[in-house]
Amino acid sequence: MEIYTTGFTQKTAAKFFETLKQAGIKQLLDIRLNNSSQLAGFAKRPDLAYFLKEICDAEYLHEPLLTPTQAILDRYRKEKRGWPNFEKEMLALLAERKIEEKIDPALFEKPTVLLCSEFSPEHCHRRLVAEYLQQHWGNIQITHL
């Protein structure tokens, strides 16, 4: 099984959708807490669902089980507690939510990408989600687009 991840910041719409098309993505799993902000530009929930269908013939899904809480985000962004603290809290949240039991692996039978806003996966929860599932489900290849 393969899980793809991507972010939309610092990318034009053309670059974003062309990358998804070239990877053969057929489903986008939005794991952002705030997916309808005006700051998201082309990646606002209703626009993104439309563009995915029209440009990539792909589906849009939002999965709140895989989003951080507002409190965790605030401690990271506003209180500046740092990435190690965020990572620890996010992994604990995923374990508490038992996502490995509540998310069906069949969801990833078609090429699926986890979407968050961060440009790179190093300091983004999409990487943590993918690695967490890899640890619990095994036999997952992670590709960051």
Image (tube, helix red, strand yellow):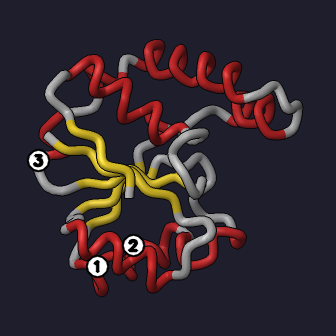
Q: In which quadrant will I find the N terminus?
A: top left
Going by the numbered disc 1, the residue's amino acid type is Lys
Disc 3 vs disc 2: which is toward the camera?
3
134 left or right of 76 in image:
left
Q: Earlier in the sequence, mark 3 or mark 1?
A: 1
Give the residue furthest to the right: 79
Tell which of 86 and 95 is nearer to you. 86
Going by the numbered disc 3, the residue's amino acid type is Glu
Residue 23 lies, in percent from the top left, at: 24, 66
Is mark 2 in CB contact (under 8 Å) with mark 1? yes
Residue 53: which numbered mark, if any? 1
42 left or right of 140 in image:
right
Residue at mark 2:
49
* Residue at the image position 27 percent from the left and 66 percent from the top: 59
Residue 128 lies, in percent from the top left, at: 46, 31
Q: Which of marks 3 and 2 is nearer the N terminus?
A: 2
